[in-house]
Amino acid sequence: MSMEARFLHIGLGLMLLLAAQCAPAIAIPGPECQTKCGRVDIPYPFGIGDNCSLSADFNTSCKEVQHGVYKPFLGKFELLNISLVNGTIRELNHISTYCYNPSSRLMEPYIWPHDARLSPYRFSDVNKFTVIGCNTLTYIKDRNATTYQSGCVSTCKNLTDVTNGSCSGMGCCQTAIPKGMDYYEVAFNGGFNTSQIWNFSRCTYAVLMEAEAFNFSTAYISTTKFNDTNTGRVPLVMDWAIRNGTMSLACEEAKLNKMGTYACLSSNSGCVNSRNGPGYLCNCSKGYEGNPYLPDGCHDVDECKNSPCPSGGVTLSSAAGILFLAAVVAVLTRRWQRIVQKRLRKIYFRKNKGILLEQLISSDHNANDGTKIFSLNELEKATDNFDHTRVVGRGGHGTVYKGILTDQRVVAIKRSKVKESIEIEQFINEVAILSQINHRNVVKLHGCCLETEVPLLVYEFISNGTLYDLLHCEKNGILLPLSWEERLRIAVEVAGALAYLHSAASMAILHRDIKCMNILLNDSYTAKVSDFGASKSIPIDQTHLVTAVQGTFGYLDPEYYHTGQLNEKSDVYSFGVILLELLTRKKAIIVNGNGERQNLSSFFFEEMGMRPLDEVVDREILEKGSEEVIMSMARLAEECLSLTREERPTMKDVEMRLQMLRVRQGVTPRKRMDGEVARRCEVVRANMTNGAILVAAASHHGSRQYSLEQEFVLSSQVPR
Ligand SMILES: *[C@@H]1O[C@H](CO)[C@@H](O)[C@H](O)[C@H]1NC(C)=O
Ligand SMILES: *[C@@H]1O[C@H](CO)[C@@H](O)[C@H](O)[C@H]1NC(C)=O
Ligand SMILES: *[C@@H]1O[C@H](CO)[C@@H](O)[C@H](O)[C@H]1NC(C)=O
Ligand SMILES: *[C@@H]1O[C@H](CO)[C@@H](O)[C@H](O)[C@H]1NC(C)=O
Ligand SMILES: *[C@@H]1O[C@H](CO)[C@@H](O)[C@H](O)[C@H]1NC(C)=O
Ligand SMILES: *[C@@H]1O[C@H](CO)[C@@H](O)[C@H](O)[C@H]1NC(C)=O
Ligand SMILES: *[C@@H]1O[C@H](CO)[C@@H](O)[C@H](O)[C@H]1NC(C)=O
Ligand SMILES: *[C@@H]1O[C@H](CO)[C@@H](O)[C@H](O)[C@H]1NC(C)=O
Ligand SMILES: *[C@@H]1O[C@H](CO)[C@@H](O)[C@H](O)[C@H]1NC(C)=O
Ligand SMILES: *[C@@H]1O[C@H](CO)[C@@H](O)[C@H](O)[C@H]1NC(C)=O
Ligand SMILES: *[C@@H]1O[C@H](CO)[C@@H](O)[C@H](O)[C@H]1NC(C)=O
Ligand SMILES: *[C@@H]1O[C@H](CO)[C@@H](O)[C@H](O)[C@H]1NC(C)=O
């Protein structure tokens, strides 16, 4: 294939890719959105104000109810709690009253209907219709009692008849409600002679409320305090779901995302149908927690630990039976299976346009010699048939296996779960492109296998985990020492790789998801940039692309976030955060002194303004780093993190300045270690020699899930 034809081809793939990205996307809340009102967290899809919630149904207002006291309201109801996990909210519901009027000598009803029709809310069945009164028959009913009406009776002749704590017909009664209700109102039956009771009971109260929040007290019979719009409010639980009036989708349909409104945006998230009414909810996959409605909202429960291997799910006793059965079936069908498998592999291979890819790779003599198309047999052999002991990483998007090829090369084989409408053309382009990137600090693609439904990718195996593990994950209760020189070297290496991607050719490759978890380390701690799953390329004469915002919170360029405009300065911003992590050994999103989550960047520069340098940066680097060089790195980070892109340096600049720092550091005399740090380092070294480090290295392997997780394809290119 000629060079021109290839570009044309690649261009087509890129257009398809862009078209896919232009599908209507759900707006996500900007960082200016308030996520708390008073003491109540308001997580997305809920939000305060116009552009902060998924829809007007989740639009919350934050009102000052007294001087300095703010409370959230949903419509006219005060919100107490929002639970994403349970799909519930708790709000304060008004009590309807039926009180004796001394002047008219009549009972006067005051009814608060609750209307949630055409909303995403339904009354949860943890609520009960609860009535307090001594001579009452009270109804709960839907609008005009057309489909539902229920009620309860409560009597008492004397206050002494009533039992404290027991709501069972004497002075108090309750009744359960069915699921699916979205409207209720109360009706009091006025047919009773109240003259015998009015001297100890002036009012009857009725309300739908959370059953658990209610504990009947005899004092409620005689009080009039609930006859008040403020004190007469009690908790009510509403189930909510992602639904839109009559146009409500169940998971199956919603997942197809035909309207571009599928709300489960996070990776490692899933969809569950609502348990009350139509619509669906999102949840984080097992082992993850957080907000599934936000891109990257679900994070590993313990980001430092491996996701556990799935248990077999078969108990031993049943396993024996199943094994026997399986053996018989296997014998009978082996022949047949072999034929089918062979045919299937051929079909997949053809579907995956293996021949075309072969052409693409073999036609370009400049491509890496190593890039090849592996047969499934080869990879099965390399991984003991994808044996679970070979799993080195597992994430929502796929599984990474360690494999040993027949030529003894150790490889990481990524098996992606993603099956949905992958543009095979794109895939081919992207593999061809990634195969041409050749930089010692970019993880190398050896090739791929096209005989499976979803192609397998084969990478060089990087043995020592991610920069994230090294910086933030304790091994045996301690963080491994990481010297200033090593940190500087890692910074230079990553900067070098990014500078290369940004400017090596007439197409700039933007990584788009630079973060510590995507920096792999080999056995000499050489940094390798990985995970090009989100990457994009733009022609160099174009200043930016407009795309759906993608990336990781804490590393995301605010300007990109706001405008959707992507250029290479977005990577510079993310890299600035890595510099801060190297300086402070703190994570990109930290929990600050007030218990709030905060970006490391804002935290760092706030602290820098208030404290001396040595109280802000990681003490370990003060051992050997000269203060001047550390300060220069902090200033460089500050430039990278500048809010305006024009003020950020280019990656080439950054790389050169870091290299200069390395040189300057080289000639700066070492400071003495202070006692405590020295002791700590000694302990680690001692434990390294007695084998503890082997444990650390073994658990490093597991963490590759983070780095290769989303790396299904590389949507980028380097024409040469
Ligand atoms: C909400 O977004 C719309 C469209 O993006 C914009 O016109 C409007 O000004 C925004 N409203 C607020 C309060 O930011
Ligand atoms: C709900 O559906 C209506 C019409 O079907 C549409 O106009 C509206 O944008 C939808 N709202 C949401 C939040 O999806
Ligand atoms: C959201 O609520 C605020 C305050 O109640 C209101 O001003 C605004 O118009 C609402 N926005 C939408 C889209 O309903
Ligand atoms: C609900 O909110 C109240 C205060 O607003 C808090 O005390 C309580 O723990 C919350 N409950 C849950 C289940 O979050
Ligand atoms: C979710 O539901 C469980 C069980 O019903 C309850 O214990 C828990 O407090 C609820 N969580 C929230 C945040 O409401
Ligand atoms: C239902 O009640 C409302 C007032 O509560 C009334 O206006 C309406 O006509 C009633 N509808 C029917 C079908 O009875
Ligand atoms: C109510 O009970 C009290 C104490 O048992 C008794 O003294 C009083 O007469 C009773 N009142 C009526 C109306 O039965
Ligand atoms: C209510 O009962 C009282 C005494 O029990 C009686 O005097 C009065 O006439 C009754 N009122 C009505 C309207 O029946
Ligand atoms: C009823 O019981 C509650 C505790 O369950 C107690 O706090 C309250 O004082 C009791 N009321 C009366 C009138 O005894
Ligand atoms: C109940 O509240 C209404 C309105 O605030 C008031 O007019 C009435 O007197 C109250 N009744 C009692 C028995 O407190
Ligand atoms: C990196 O990992 C290898 C094992 O994969 C181990 O032998 C080596 O010591 C590790 N290097 C460092 C610097 O920890
Ligand atoms: C180092 O190893 C020794 C014994 O081998 C152990 O007592 C000590 O707790 C270890 N220290 C750390 C920090 O792991």
Image (spheres, rainbow, N blue to C red):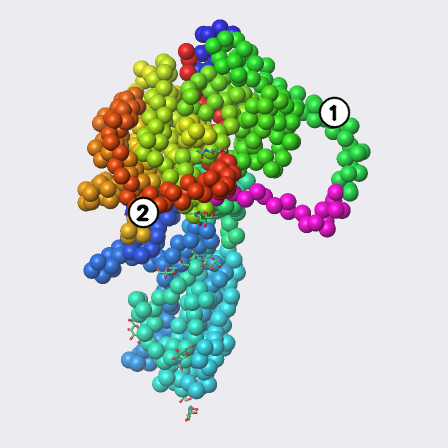
Image quarter of residue 717: top left
Residue 309 magenta-highlighted: yes
In the image: residue 185, left or right of residue 72? right
What residue do we see at 49% from left, 62% from top? 126
| Lateral position of residue 306 relative to residue 203, left or right | right
Q: Position of residue 548 (x, y in %)?
A: 38, 30
Total tally of numbered discs in the picture: 2
Residue 496 in view (yes/no): yes
Residue 450 seen in the current view? no
Q: Nearer the viewer, mark 2 or mark 1?
A: 2
Residue for point 38% across, 39% down:
481
- Quadrant containing ligand 7: bottom left
Q: What segment carries the magenta color?
A: 304-323
In the image, is residue 281 above or below residue 410?
below
Q: Residue at x 67, y 47 (%)?
A: 314
In the structure shown, which secondary structural element does the residue marked by tag 1 occupy? helix
Amino acid on which disc 2 is placed: Glu
What residue lies at 48% left-to-right and 77% top-to-bottom?
Answer: 166
Residue type (three-letter) at the residue carrying disc 1 = Ile
**Which label belongs to residue 339?**
1
- Lateral position of residue 595 relative to residue 182, left or right: left
Q: Quadrant of the C terminus?
A: top left
- Residue 676's disc is 2
Residue 630, horizontal then vertical, whole percent: 25, 34
Placement of 26 over or under 411, stated as above or below = below
